[in-house]
Image (tube, rainbow, N blue to C red):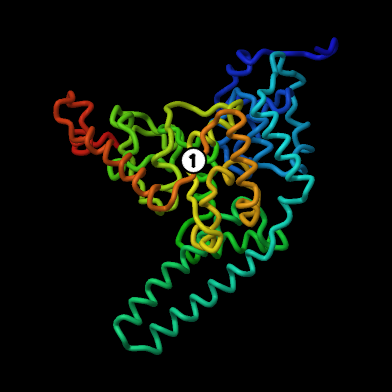
Amino acid sequence: MGANKKYISSDELKKHNKSDDLWISIQEKVYNVTDWAKEHPGGDVPLLNLAGHDVTDAFIAFHPGTAWKYLDRFFTGYYLGDFKVSEVSRDFRKLHSEFSKAGMFEKKGHGVIYSLCFVALLLFTCVYGVLCCDGFWIHMFSGGLLGFLWMQVAYLGHDSGHYQIMTTRGFNKFAQILSGNCLTGISIAWWKWTHNAHHISCNSLDYDPDLQHLPMLAVSSKLFHSLTSQFYGSIFICRHSFQHIQFTLNHFAANVYVGAPKGDDWFEKQTSGTIDIDCSSWMDWFFGGLQFQLEHHLFPRLPRCHLRNISPVVRELCKKHNLPYRSLSFFEANVWTLRTLRTAALEARDFSNPIPKNLLWEAVNTHG
């Protein structure tokens, strides 16, 4: 420890974990981001969820190198006295640094152009089929193509929310609004709000909004015990629409936990809460790169064209640290997901449980 440095412990840091007193630690330095939280481009939820913790790995994963220069104005003058880096975090940061030096975060390939051309082709075919043909099955086929079109547009919106897919930030913002607000009916601001919370709190039953689907779906019996949604701020049963099948396969059958995320187990939480879908490279367009869910969660700013290439490296890193790396076929992932939902459903209808634990009673007597 430096003679002229001021230090606080991790226990002291954890006391600053509220919206009106929000401190975090990055690379040993302690920052007060209380007044900045509402201005944070990624929303205040990620900061609130990790308040009072070292968030170095999460900061590295979500921010470009240019973001480091903005931290100094939030520096409290304190350093984390018991700061330490685990071996898995050390390897994660080394890998991220290698990707950055190789320019992988800037090299986006021609995927966006291909996707836009594909969307234009689907749109033309769909409109032509509806307006220029009278056959029932042609109209049905056109409707199916429209579904594929929306799916591809949603993938583009997802990518634009994580990194800049266009030549300028202005064009990227336009792509977000066009793909989200205009074409799929999803507010890009709402999506960022929920999606960043999902990445930070991957598979936390009470902090990850993408797992909170009651009374329609439940992935764990723990949801039947009046857990409070820390994201929506109410006891759920919460009202939430169905997520697309891609998300259910990538997360529903993975490990879940209760409680807030921590910043010092970033790699471990992502490996625990994700499932990859094993498929041929010619099917990458169908999954939008999200079949490599673990790779995407570890490196959310990495363009999808690189995810298949880094998959073996991530697999070896998981093997080195004895962490799960699940890669299932599309069929197997569906079986795992349905089995998870079935297990929760059987517990939900178990009338031998006391009334407060019975989901049917909860559904009728909705808390709000």
- Tell me the SS state at disc 1: loop
- Most foreground residue, 157 or 171: 157
- Most foreground residue, 331 or 95: 331
Rendered position, 277 above or below 183: above
Q: Residue at x 44, y 52 (%)?
A: 246
Q: Residue at x 36, y 49 (%)?
A: 334
On the image, the x and y values in percent for residue 29 come to 74, 24
Rendered position, 23 above or below 176: above
Amino acid type at mark 1 = Arg
Q: Residue at x 26, y 41 (%)?
A: 342
Residue 11 placement, left or right of 107: left
Q: Residue at x 20, y 30 (%)?
A: 358
Quadrant in which the C terminus appears: top left
Identify residue for label 1. Answer: 326
Q: Residue furthest top?
A: 3
**How many C-alpha atoms fall within 10 Å of the one at disc 1: few (<14), some, or many (≥20)?**
some
On the image, the x and y values in percent for residue 297 come to 57, 42
Residue 266 placement, left or right of 272: right
- Most foreground residue, 28 or 221: 221
